[in-house]
Image (spheres, grey):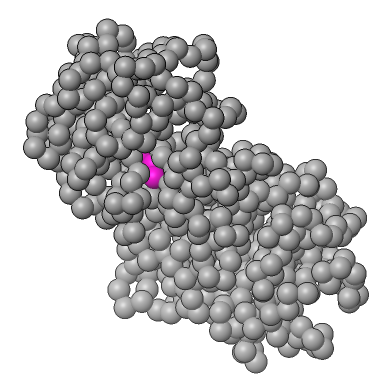
Amino acid sequence: MVKGLPAEWGTCTRTVALANRLLALTCWKDTIAVGLTSGDIIILDGITGSQTAILSGHTDWVRSLAFLPDGTSLVSGSHDKTIKLWDVQTGGVVKTFYGHTDYVLSVSISADCTMIASGSGDMTICLWNIQTEACSHVIRQQDYVYTVGFSPTDPCHLTSVSGGKVWHWDINGHQTKPEYDSSHIAFSLNGTWFVFCHEGEIVVQNTDSGAIVAKFNSNKNTIRDCCLSPDGKLIAVAADHATYVWDATSSHPHPIKIFVGHTGDITSLVFSSSSSLISSSNDQSVKFWQIGALETDPVVTGLEPVSLTSTPIASISLQAEAGIAVSSDSEGAVKTWDISTGLCNATFQTPAKTYDRRGVQLVNDRLILIYYGHWNQKLCIVDVEKGKLLQTVPLGVSSYDIEDFKISKDGSWVACLYQQFVRAWSIQMGEVVGEVELEECDVERSLTVDDSGVWVHSPGSEPLGWDFGIPGSPPVQLSNMPLLDSRDTKVWDVNQSQIKDAVTGKVVFQLGGRFANPTCSQWDGQYLVAGYYSGEVFILDSKHVLSW
């Protein structure tokens, strides 16, 4: 118990300080999501309070958040007028829902996970089909829709708070019950009853019959949020800087706990268990509260966002047939990663330290590294595991002019894309085996190679390919690119960090959060690997995120 406070005053066990004002809060088990005025969503560990991820994608305030029942996905509503569905594990945007013409103030997910309801400053409720992203119904109200929520058990019923009243609707947009005065509403997990607040009065009502189960007078006219404990026994109400907890089963209504500690107005409340509560505030903090008495004084810690200071990843390759990804960082360390587990299999130190451009891949069970230095203008090819220099090729151009280089799958030659040329050299002899001149291009391009073919990829254009494998003859232009399954219509846009449908141009997945801007990446139609300035390597099985 905190010394010097009355026994009924609650205990703060942890404080997490963040850099922006906090507007939205939700949790699933030990995962907590916090929406900020910056547009970011912070993911916190509910046990330690440490920051585990940042989801970046909204361009304005995040006002509302809701986890899907399994905790793998999160829905957010923002002042940027959009709703986003996130993959919590990867930090990526799975879908974005467009249609509101004003701020999105509230979001909710139906119990069967097929629909999203959103309330907006445009005075409408939109019902969205998660699978198709289509808006199936629009419910018009006479004022801002500050709260909208599906029944926890009935996917066909939802409630809203608008114009100081609570409204009941079905999914076809029909009002099912008379409206009544209220400013906030929350449901029990089993959906059998709900609590609403009006002018300082707290009312608990049966969902089906409408009978009043309990009624409390809080003497607080500035109620900002309310919520129910998972077991349905406790009601928490935020008013100004304090939170009041009531025993809903008591025959003598009174606050059993009062949580005081925030220095700004509380913006959101959520129970993380039947005996613990989390609050967010305009004072830029999240506080964790213990409802049961602690035997010792609480430990209060202020945590800053996680700082990632590892060596940046400079190149990465994906070789799904071997079950690995290979990365090289700016200090010359080469690592192999198991794409099924995400674990590092082995680490090798190479002499590529301080070199500007590099590429690494597995060739005939040997790890081969290519690197190019701005100062010596030589392409160096090294056997990583033996530490043996296989070949040097002088290019005589700045490393800034080099866009990409790749080793052929059979390991016999290397292709380099620089200035307006694609040129290939024999690794064994160091001699030029072919050259193609390209048209000028003002966007960054990349290469794909196999045993004899080279393809140049440019954003928004079809790949151009040539066969370099005919001895003594110039490269022959190829009419198609057989490396990718022709049935796969998804393409990876490196510059936008997005997987798009090649036919419709629609974004079907986008990397977000700290994974939003990879230094390098590769995708083979199923697996995506990306390296980051933080030194992290991200591995994604796209069948997971594209199955929505």
User: In terms of image quadrants, where is residue 2?
Assistant: bottom left
Direction from residue 104 to residue 16 in the image, left or right: left
Question: In this orientation, does residue 526 appear?
Answer: yes
* Residue span colored magenta: 529-533
Direction from residue 306 to residue 153 in the image, left or right: right
Work out whether residue 241 or residue 379 is closer to the camera in this orientation and state it: 379
**The N terminus lies in which quarter of the figure?**
bottom left
Question: In this orientation, does residue 217 appear?
Answer: no
For the point 59% across and 42% down, the residue is: 500
Work out whether residue 60 or residue 198 is closer to the camera in this orientation and state it: 60
Q: Residue furthest bottom?
A: 251
Direction from residue 408 to residue 489 in the image, left or right: right
Q: Whole-percent x and y of residue 156? A: 78, 74
Q: Whole-percent x and y of residue 20? A: 52, 43
Work out whether residue 214 or residue 543 is closer to the camera in this orientation and state it: 543
For the point 19% across and 45% down, the residue is: 365
For the point 34% across and 27% down, the residue is: 469
Work out whether residue 269 or residue 39 is closer to the camera in this orientation and state it: 39
Prevailing secondary structure class for the magenta stretch in the rendered image: strand
Count of picture labels: 0
Q: Whole-percent x and y of residue 297? A: 32, 69
**The C terminus lies in which quarter of the figure?**
bottom right
- The magenta stretch spans residue 450: no
Q: Whole-percent x and y of residue 106? A: 70, 57
Q: Is residue 175 above or below residue 354?
A: below
For the point 59% across and 45% down, the residue is: 489
Q: Residue furthest top?
A: 396
User: In terms of image quadrants, where is residue 266?
Assistant: bottom right
- The magenta stretch spans residue 531: yes
Q: Is residue 186 above or below residue 54?
A: below
